[in-house]
Amino acid sequence: MTHNAQPTASHFIDGAPAEDTAGAPIDVIYPATGDIIARVHGATPAILERAVASARAAQVDWAARSGAERGRILRRAADLIRARNHDLSVLETLDTGKPYQETSVADAASGADALEYFGGMAATLTGQHIPLGEDWAYTRREPLGLCAGIGAWNYPTQIACWKAAPALACGNAMIFKPSETTPLSALKVAEILTEAGLPAGLFNVVQGMGDVGAALVADPRIDKVSLTGSVPTGRKVYAAAAEGMKHVTMELGGKSPLVIFDDADLESAVSGAILGNFYSSGQVCSNGTRVFVQDGIRPAFLSRLAERVSQAVIGDPMDPDTSFGPLVSARQLEIVESYIARGQSEGARLICGGSRLSRPGYWLAPTVFADVTDDMTIAREEIFGPVMAVLGFSEESEVLARANATAFGLSAGVFTRDLTRAHRMAAGFQAGTCFINSYNDAPVEVPFGGMKLSGVGRENAAAAIEHYSQLKSVFVRMGALEAPY
């Protein structure tokens, strides 16, 4: 069955769809079938110029509005997204291949949550009064100006909203460049924001490959760059942003540990491992892909895990019963297959999966390796696919040291019934986002981000406001001022 998801135009600029077919063509492929379902064009210099100029012009008036007025528009957009959740979820499934069972609850819904949360917060963004004897000072919280958002292909709608909501709440404008693999849903977010009353130019979407992102980052009129992507991309973008002293948020990759103690609830621990490795076919930056299982529970864990993984419903992603979908692209499938081959050649024991499924599209069976050691490639490098590595351990202090022995530090999880041990582990993990008896929850009320190579800055919660605004201090002298001459 072929789907047509062709948008009105490739870009969304100054409140309306915009096209320039001189830009490089980008085919949009439905990962479940390999069919081309749409085509967009990369942004030309003329398109980028329009995007930047319209955003700069619109931002001045937007910053002058009250926070309450800005917030009202964001909350209206959240309501529209919720009302259209079905259509947006279908589009997200076409764009990413993720099952509708997932996109209908996790993608547009999370985007709406962000718009609602920051919409509610917009009116509360104030400075402070600082008494200094008879003199005093005050601070003003002001927008940064024009922010560039650069998205990843695994959560296109969510990432667009996670970046746009705090940026707009603080009085900034944003130009958003989706991943070239998933260009469709950000255009819908832009349409909905405009329909909700967002003035033209404040949320512009431009398509393109890495060169378009690089042009945005290098533009002196851009004040901040927020990237979700891989560590190699993050290093390049961070370095380029540093040239212009731009503010940055970097939400990068990970190789996160999930530690399961003997006393853990077995079913919950297996659920955590499944959610932390196979949700979105494993294409989640925070996934707990190094699953450390204590010696006593490991045989039972592996046996129950294999049983439950065999119950995954692999089928048409549009079928609400399907619970496991394809990888996003042919390239991603090749990358993941090469890691599976490395795992086997380095001596890991394949428990299940390990091969591509014989059907059109980019399908790979959920894969579990046991007897993995810390030095194996599959235990050190981010795979970004449905490949779980199970490692053994005996002692708490040993597993904590091994869990932290990585250049990444995005997430970490622990399953145990021992309350003090759970909090001890959470305190000891070198990771920005930790979970106790759970994995990969991302409510907008909680800051999300990484340590070490996994990034800088935080998304979501009140913490995001710090990354989309700046403080101005104003000193007020109430009496006469003296000078030595």
Image (cartoon, rainbow, N blue to C red):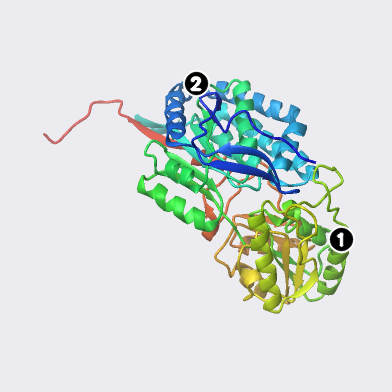
Residue 437 spot, x, y in % from top left: 76, 57
The residue carrying mark 1 is 308
- Give above or below for 56 relative to 351: above
Q: Quadrant of the N terminus?
A: top right
Dots 2 and 1: beta carbons under 8 Å?
Answer: no
Residue 134 in the figure: left or right of residue 426: left
Residue 196 in view: no
Residue 476 spot, x, y in % from top left: 33, 28
The quarter holding residue 303 reads bottom right
Q: Residue furthest bottom?
A: 347
Residue 112 in view: yes
Rate crowding at label 2 as few (under 14), some (14 to 19) or many (20 or more) other CA atoms within 10 Å: few
The residue carrying mark 2 is 65
Real-space CA distance between mark 2 and mark 1, rounded to the nearest whole angstrom: 53 Å
Q: Quadrant of the C terminus?
A: top left
Residue located at (66% from left, 33% from top): 6
Residue 148 spot, x, y in % from top left: 48, 39
Total tally of numbered discs in the picture: 2
Residue 386 in the figure: left or right of residue 243: right
Looking at marks 2 and 1 on the same chain, the residue that comes earlier in the sequence is marked by 2
Instruction: Report the disc number at residue 9.
Output: none
